[in-house]
Amino acid sequence: MKILITGGAGYIGSHTCLQLLRQGFEVVVIDNLSNSKKESLEAVKLLSGKHLHFYNIDLLDLPAISQVFADHTIDAVIHFAGVKSVTESINIPLHYYTTNIVSTLNLCATMLKFKVYSLVFSSSAVVYGDSERVPITEDSALIPTNPYGKTKVVIENILRDLHTSNPIWQIAILRYFNPTGSDNSGLIGEDPILPANNLFPIISSVAAGKLKELQIYGNDYPTLDGTCVRDYVHVTDLANGHIRVLKHLETSPGMVTYNLGAGKGYSVIEVVEAFSKACNQKIPYRIVPRRRGEIAVSYANSDLIFQELGWKAEKDLDSMCADSWKWQVNNINGYK
């Protein structure tokens, strides 16, 4: 099978490309490199010993997308591409609605034109907002608290309408929680061009001496230690989850929605302590005011995908911290 990966040079995309190549798939990547680096794909080719096709184009460029489909016989698409900062989305919402939604419409229109009907969509746990119940199941209410999350809900609805209009479409919506870690080789990892908003790359930078301290946004949440609680899932587990779902669509066409998470929440302080253990040093931090749009507790119930497909997160928090630190030590300034 030949799989098109949008956003394939990014953090999750590159790890998914690696696992696909390791499992015998052919891979075509579209990425505009706005928050990723082509070097990630060079590392993927080195680790896998296999070739992939790369196109530096934007999904807002409809003719360019069509050319990729004309150049290759695509069997299925995994759609990661998009902008993804909660804070940034609050400040520039129009950019988020335009980029995430229009790019998906362009992608789907091109798939329809070339009769490619299998799609795995990268959604997010942000669609649940401040859920009234945890762990969060797939039938929980969708009440996102920021424009980024709202774009994900709009896209999910578009994809459901697409499947309703023609059941030939095979679509999976994957709502994953907080990806972290890196491939155990330490050769690919999270190296954002834009300022990092996720906890792990910031902690790594503090441990490496690139940042003075970690800022913890609020310690007055209704949690055990007052800091936010999140479900962290190793990026390799996440990549393998996408492939498991892709294979499922091939043999059992339809439309499915799954949570991908570890099913356990860790507070910011707990993560700091685990990372301190992994890097054998204290992580300095300072409590600062809450960020707008943040929620107190969010972790997954991933029983559905385990029951139906047999997938579950295998790697624990210590492994996530150790692999994140290995990537940081081996790539002190990122890919370059």
Image: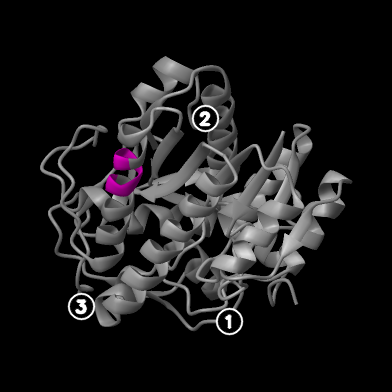
Element assignment for label 1 = loop
Q: In the drawing, does residue 226 fall left or right of residue 54? A: left
Query: Which residue is drawn at the image coordinates 20% and 73% (left, top)?
Result: 290
| Amino acid type assigned to the residue bearing label 2 in the image | Val
| Amino acid type assigned to the residue bearing label 1 in the image | Lys
Mark 2 and mark 3 residues within 8 Å of each other at the beta carbon: no
The answer to whether residue 286 shows anywhere in this view is: no
- Image coordinates of residue 176 in percent, x first then y, are 40, 44
The quarter of the image holding the C terminus is bottom right
Query: Which residue is drawn at the image coordinates 54% and 37% (left, top)?
Result: 242
Span of residues in magenta: 157-161
- Image coordinates of residue 331 in percent, x first then y, are 73, 69
Q: Nearer the viewer, residue 273 or 200?
A: 200
Residue 210, disc: 1
Circle 3 sits on which residue? 289
Circle 2 sits on which residue? 245
Distance in Å between CA atoms under marks 2 and 3: 39 Å
Image height of 220 relative to 153, above or below: below
Q: Place residue 173 in its image quadrant.
A: top left
| Amino acid type assigned to the residue bearing label 3 in the image | Pro
Q: Nearer the viewer, residue 194 or 155?
A: 155
The answer to whether residue 253 shows anywhere in this view is: yes
The quarter of the image holding the N terminus is top right
Q: In the drawing, does residue 202 fall left or right of residue 328? A: left
Mark 2 and mark 1 residues within 8 Å of each other at the beta carbon: no
Judge depth for marks 2 and 1 and give the one in front. Answer: 2
